[in-house]
Image (cartoon, helix red, strand yellow):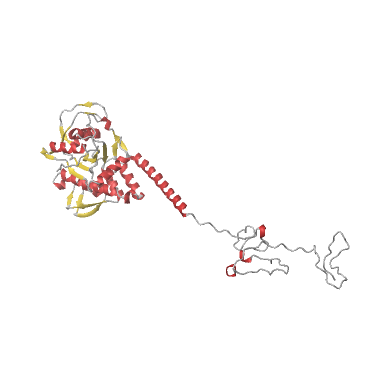
Amino acid sequence: MNDWPDRRTGDRSERYGRGSASPQPESARAMPHIQRRPAPPQRPHVPPQSQGYDDRYPSDPHGSPGYDSGYNTGQVYGGGAGGGRGRGGGRAGGDAGYVQGRPAPDWRRRIKLGALTLVTVFLVVSVSTYFWADSKLKREVDLSKVIERPSEGEGTNYLIVGSDSREGMSAEDKKRLRTGSAEGKRTDSMMILHRGSNGPTLISLPRDSQVEIPSFKGSQSGKLFPGTGRQVKLNAAYAEDGPELLVRTVEFNTGLRIDHYVEIGFGGFANIVDALGGVEMDIPKAFKDKKSGADFQAGKQTLNGEQSLAFVRTRYAFKGSDLDRTKNQQKFLAALASQAATPSTVLNPFRLYPTLGAGLDTLIVDKDMSLWSLSQMFFAMKGVTGGDGTSMNIPLAGSNGGNLVWDKAKVKQLMEQLKNDEKVTVTGN
């Protein structure tokens, strides 16, 4: 039985398989009903060792190329232009079945973006911190009220004042720090810090210095008080009319113009030290003072806020001498500034923010003082004990009834050197 299907053409009687009666074999006959599958495109020949398994079928007897399954190239049967999926699961393009890998990361671009992000964050944090800290300064001293001021000189001059203000302190704090409960505030220490091109110079002005109160304008009343030649202790000027009269008195008796005023009270001083984690000091000789609470052994030691305040206030352990106390104050303030201006404090937010918060809340400065100028003051203070920095007491000629009398000739020479920003050659007591 013949299973071949019929092929219908124009002659409906024509069927497949009709033979010939001739004994000779028939010549090749066109068989339009048989259609050969089109051969796939030829690929470049790949050596067997790199091609892998080759499952090509041999060519047919008529020389037509055999069928290539494309197994070794990732092409699956039926892929072709339709685009099947290769072995890697990726979409094959054309008849190649090529799977494109993930591009290599651009590390140079990533590093640049990361660095730019870090710089941006650093700038934002720095600017925010600056304005936050700047807003905490108490700009309460108006130097424009000071009359008959000396001419400006080279460099910058700061008047640094430590007061016995107990503002903001609880009864427990006053007892712990042995400050007493006196009302108002008085100057406990006064220093001139000169910052110039020849290194910083720190000059202590003993509070028992005998000075003349000049004419001045009242800071509150605006009333003009003429000078009468009154001779008083230096700290009396502050007690009489506050920071403005103190600046006026210092300028009148030294001839040096004060550019900025900085004042800190007892509580703020102790809080700064505690926020820094203490200040390391090398005490050459042991001493005690019942009034200040000082009780120190000789040698290196770290002082907390309470101990630091006792250290800078101690006077009676040195036979009542204010000169020894001012030397201790200079030494301590230089150590405090040196520790506060280190990278371990400036770059550590867990130390920087508590220190700024503790100190700036209690600092009283002049209206023209900026946070930048204040930071320059601290760095100058740090340089007092290192490099070409100088620290001294103001030159003295003797005493008069318990008041310390300045050596006017030396003081004039010293102030001229500071005013002209020259190297200091004058020595103090």
In the image, 223 versus 73, the foreground residue is 73
In the image, 299 versus 81, the foreground residue is 81
Is the N terminus in the top left, top right, bottom left or bottom right quadrant? Answer: bottom right
* Residue 420 visible here: yes
* Residue 168 visible here: no
Q: Relative to residue 284, is residue 392 depicted above or below?
A: above
Q: Position of residue 40 (x, y in %)?
A: 68, 62
Q: Relative to residue 99, is residue 208 depicted above or below?
A: above
Residue 25 is left or right of residue 183, and the answer is: right
Give the residue at x 15% y 47%.
318
Q: Quadrant of residue 264?
A: top left
Q: Position of residue 88 (x, y in %)?
A: 59, 62
Give the residue at x 42% y 46%.
120
Q: Position of residue 276 (x, y in %)?
A: 30, 49
Q: Relative to residue 169, is residue 3 depicted above or below?
A: below
Give the residue at x 48% y 54%.
106
Q: Relative to residue 11, is residue 186 depicted above or below?
A: above
Q: Can you name the residue that lies furthest to the bottom here? A: 23
In the image, 328 versus 30, the foreground residue is 30
Residue 36 is left or right of residue 11, and the answer is: left
In the image, 377 versus 145, the foreground residue is 377
- Number of numbered discs present? 0
Is the C terminus in the top left, top right, bottom left or bottom right quadrant? Answer: top left
Q: Position of residue 219 (x, y in %)?
A: 26, 30
